[in-house]
Amino acid sequence: MAWDFETESAFQKELDWIDALVREEVEPLDHVLGNPYDIHNPRNQKLVRPLQAEVKKRKLWACHLGPELGGPGYGQLKLALMNEILGRSRFAPTVFGCQAPDTGNAEILAHYGTSEQKKKYLEPLLNNDIVSCFSMTEPHAGADPKMFKCRATLDGDFWVINGEKWFSSNARFASFLIAMVVTDPDAPPYQKMSMFLVPSDTPGINILRNVGLGTEREEGEHAYIRYEDVRIPRENLLGQRGQGFEVAQTRLGGGRIHHAMRTMGQVKKAFDMMCERVLSRETQGEVLANKQMVQEQIADSWIEMEQFRLLVLRTAWRIDKYKDYRKVRKDIAAIKALMPKVYHDIVYRALRLLLHDESRRWTN
Ligand SMILES: Cc1cc2nc3c(=O)[nH]c(=O)nc-3n(C[C@H](O)[C@H](O)[C@H](O)COP(=O)(O)OP(=O)(O)OC[C@H]3O[C@@H](n4cnc5c(N)ncnc54)[C@H](O)[C@@H]3O)c2cc1C
């Protein structure tokens, strides 16, 4: 019976190397550079490219990809162990060539793209010479694609797209967008939509605003886009007409668990900061760490973090075992539901302990 929670020693060496690089060389970039997707910015090029070269030399570049696409094909469990380190830093996924949404977009290009589409979009994407955007969510419809309204109609040899999308992450840096659009409104619900490759310099892609979330700096990353008479060649269809939902599902299963893996890293970072803080800060005659309610917050955080981690790792293990996302749909759905709760609760406790002085000042 195989039921083992240990990492084999050869791979542990790689994880130790990744951990040292991320802590010493990559995390500092978060403080001095702007956006990891701003890849043509000379400052990003100067500081990020040499680190990417080191990662490639170590054969740890794009570990989400199988050998057929130039990656080592480690599988999801090893990727989870890597991503929980990379999640600590905004720049680490880019340094290791496994940043969302490019990973998922590469996956569907590899699955459904024609050889011309792969040459034009997939090859430079895998090399981080360009970045991409996945443009699916609509303002009124959220996570329910059956309600999408953004429409493409055929006009001779061109598709013409009209409608709105939001939360289109990184649209302002992307060379192309993959847009999920209604082409056949009278078809059954899951066959109404098709997927399109839309070069971002096509006239009519109007970014109404960029929304910022969490740790994002300067202008936000998540675009609210109005597509107005966006004309793209007929051959820019990705997959078959009416296959949009299926194409989307191919990327979202993997995409969700990859976010969960990186969230483990962010949660661990918040936990580490919390632990450091309670040992260094004194109040009312003793360090915070001596106070029983603080100890309870640390204990609750550790328990929640470890439970979440085990669920993510077991799900990754099941993906590797079955090689069929449909068999792990429920595990991935459970992670998706649990992730924001664990993230919120631990980061909230960390903030309260880190901002102890400030909150006391406000309440006095
Ligand atoms: C940081 C970030 C980046 C993103 N990047 C992208 C991107 O690159 N491309 C893209 O296309 N989209 C992106 N999204 C959008 C993301 O896919 C949507 O946020 C997600 O699909 C949920 O949609 P929604 O936020 O509209 O909420 P909905 O799922 O529509 O939910 C709205 C409300 O209804 C509740 N609800 C939903 N379903 C049920 C139910 N069955 N029963 C009871 N209550 C329910 C929810 O709890 C919520 O309160 C991003 C979102 C975020 C936060």
Image (cartoon, rainbow, N blue to C red):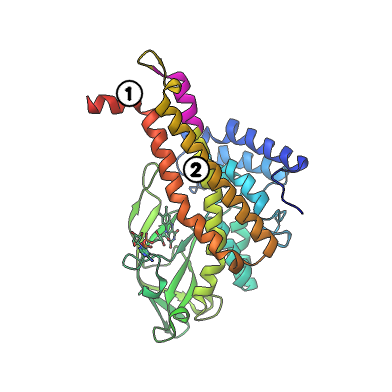
Q: Residue at x 55, y 65 (%)?
A: 329
From the viewer's side, name the closer residue of 179 and 270.
Answer: 270
Q: Amino acid at mark 2?
A: Glu
Residue behind label 2 places its C-beta within 8 angstroms of ligand 1: no
Residue where numbered disc 2 is placed: 304
Q: Which residue is mark 1?
A: 357
Dominant secondary structure, magenta: helix
Classify residue 162 as left or right of residue 304. Answer: left
Residue depicted at 42% across the width and 39% down the height: 347
In x, y percent, where is residue 57? 72, 43
Image: magenta residue range: 272-282
Q: Is residue 178 left or right of residue 227?
A: right
Choose the circle earlier in sequence order: 1 or 2.
2
When asked about the image quadrant of residue 49, the answer is: top right
Residue 278 falls inside the magenta stretch: yes
Q: Is residue 202 above or below residue 255?
A: below
Find the distance from the CA under tag 1 to the CA under tag 2: 26 Å
Left or right, 267 with respect to 229, comes to right
Q: Quadrant of the C terminus?
A: top left
Q: Quick one: SS at disc 2?
A: helix
For disc 1, the neighbor class at 10 Å (few under 14, some 14 to 19, many from 20) is few
Evaluate whether residue 198 shows in this view: yes
Q: Amino acid at mark 1?
A: Asp
Is residue 132 visible in the rendered image? The answer is: no
Residue closest to the far left? 364
Question: What secondary structure is found at the residue carrying circle 1?
Answer: helix
> Ligand 1 shows up in which quadrant of the image?
bottom left
Where is residue 87 shown, x and y percent of the image?
A: 54, 43
Q: Position of residue 71 (x, y in %)?
A: 70, 55
Q: Which residue is more in the foreground, 144 or 167?
A: 144
